[in-house]
Image (cartoon, grey):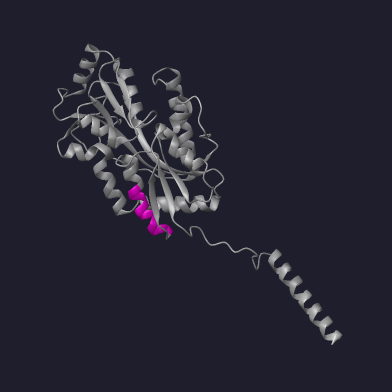
């Protein structure tokens, strides 16, 4: 009986050694990992529902879900000029399941805010730029202001009394208004909100005089006649509003301020995951469904590599930092 037991022990030992050697070569993994993604992916929008970022995120989510084979859903986390939502993503696991819908505020906050709970340049990994978009200067349909010159005249007659709304400090709406005030040599009162929807509500209700809104947020109200578009903030006219002049054409030479949206993941997200997300974004942005949403909103799809988006954001950080330091944009 003893020899049989010894032979069994030796055989078992040889099997264990063989298994360990095979595993060390990577032929039989000791810990199997499911391919990414194996669960839903969350897009954190640091604005309230109803604005341009929300529109892009929800449209993108539909097409990315098809490409990734998993549900992609949107979670709105507005507040503090996008800092609340950005901080959530910065502190999330770097596994590709929590992404930030970043905007121009992402590039402005480092210079606009004295202290952030994260590092804009170190806490995130770029995925891709998605779209670029002009803002539109709008007023209520019953507003006495029918042109940019009317707004400038009224602001000069009542310094600091005309109000403009934005969905938070550092947003494209805020920057567009601040740049307008600087170049037109007028004083405006900036009123911040937690998103485009509440800002629009107060504009429509008469509590606010003007708004530099994203095309996505103000488009429906321009169409139904509740808002009047006075100018677009891009260098050339928008295909969505071909009859609306640019700010330069309307009497503010040299004016240019565009919004943009992209995706960031937490720093440390594996390169393979970033590449898979990037491929999904690029494919989603080319679909007819996604493109159809952009045309009416005056947005233009502009995607690229993670490295290109990272370089773009760094350039934006430097650009707006110079303007903050020159007091064009007040902290």
x and y percentages locating residue 20 in the rendered image: 73, 68
- Position of 137 relative to 52 (above/below): above
- Position of 77 relative to 26 (above/below): above
- Position of 150 relative to 15 (above/below): above
82 sits left or right of 134 in the view: right
Q: Quadrant of residue 145?
A: top left
| Camera-side residue of 107 and 39 | 39
- Position of 109 relative to 60 (above/below): above
Q: Quadrant of residue 80?
A: top left
Residue 256 visible, this angle: no
- What residue sits 26% from the left and 16% below the top? 161
x and y percentages locating residue 38 in the rendered image: 48, 60
Predominant secondary structure in magenta? Answer: helix
User: Which quadrant is home to the N terminus?
Assistant: bottom right
- What residue sits 28% from the left and 32% below the top? 199
Which residue extends farthest bottom? Answer: 1
Range of residues picked out in magenta: 58-68
2 sits left or right of 209 in the view: right
177 sits left or right of 129 in the view: left
| Camera-side residue of 38 and 327 | 38
x and y percentages locating residue 316 in the rendered image: 44, 31
208 sits left or right of 39 in the view: left
User: Which quadrant is home to the C terminus?
Assistant: top left
Which residue extends farthest right? Answer: 2
């Amino acid at each position: 009986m003893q020899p049989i037991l010894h032979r069994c022990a030796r055989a078992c030992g040889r099997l264990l050694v063989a298994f360990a050697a095979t595993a060390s070569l990577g032929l039989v993994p000791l810990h199997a990992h499911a391919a990414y993604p194996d669960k839903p992916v969350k897009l954190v929008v640091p604005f309230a529902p109803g604005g341009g970022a929300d529109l892009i995120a929800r449209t993108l989510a539909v097409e990315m879900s098809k490409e990734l084979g998993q549900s992609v859903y949107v979670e709105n986390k507005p507040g503090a000029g996008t800092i609340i939502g950005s901080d959530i993503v910065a502190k999330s696991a770097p596994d590709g399941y929590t992404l930030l819908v970043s905007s121009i505020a992402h590039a402005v906050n480092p210079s606009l805010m004295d202290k952030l709970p994260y590092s804009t340049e170190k806490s995130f990994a770029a995925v891709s730029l998605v779209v670029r978009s002009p803002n539109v200067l709008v007023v209520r349909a019953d507003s006495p202001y029918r042109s940019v010159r009317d707004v400038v005249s009224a602001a000069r007659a009542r310094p600091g009394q005309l109000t403009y709304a934005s969905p938070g400090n550092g947003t494209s709406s805020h920057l567009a208004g601040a740049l307008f005030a600087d170049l037109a040599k007028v004083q405006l009162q900036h009123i911040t909100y937690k998103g485009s929807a509440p800002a629009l509500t107060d504009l429509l209700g008469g509590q606010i005089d003007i708004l530099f809104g994203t095309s996505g947020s103000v488009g429906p109200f321009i169409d139904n006649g509740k808002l009047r578009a006075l100018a677009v903030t891009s260098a050339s006219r928008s295909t969505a509003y071909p009859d609306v002049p640019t700010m330069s054409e309307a009497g503010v030479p040299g004016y240019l301020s565009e919004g943009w949206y992209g995706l960031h993941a937490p720093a440390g997200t594996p390169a393979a995951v970033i590449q898979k997300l990037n491929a999904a974004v690029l494919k989603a942005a080319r679909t007819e469904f996604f493109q159809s949403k952009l045309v009416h909103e005056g947005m233009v799809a502009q995607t690229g590599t993670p490295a290109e988006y990272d370089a773009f954001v760094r350039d934006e950080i430097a650009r707006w930092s110079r303007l903050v330091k020159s007091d064009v944009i007040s902290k």
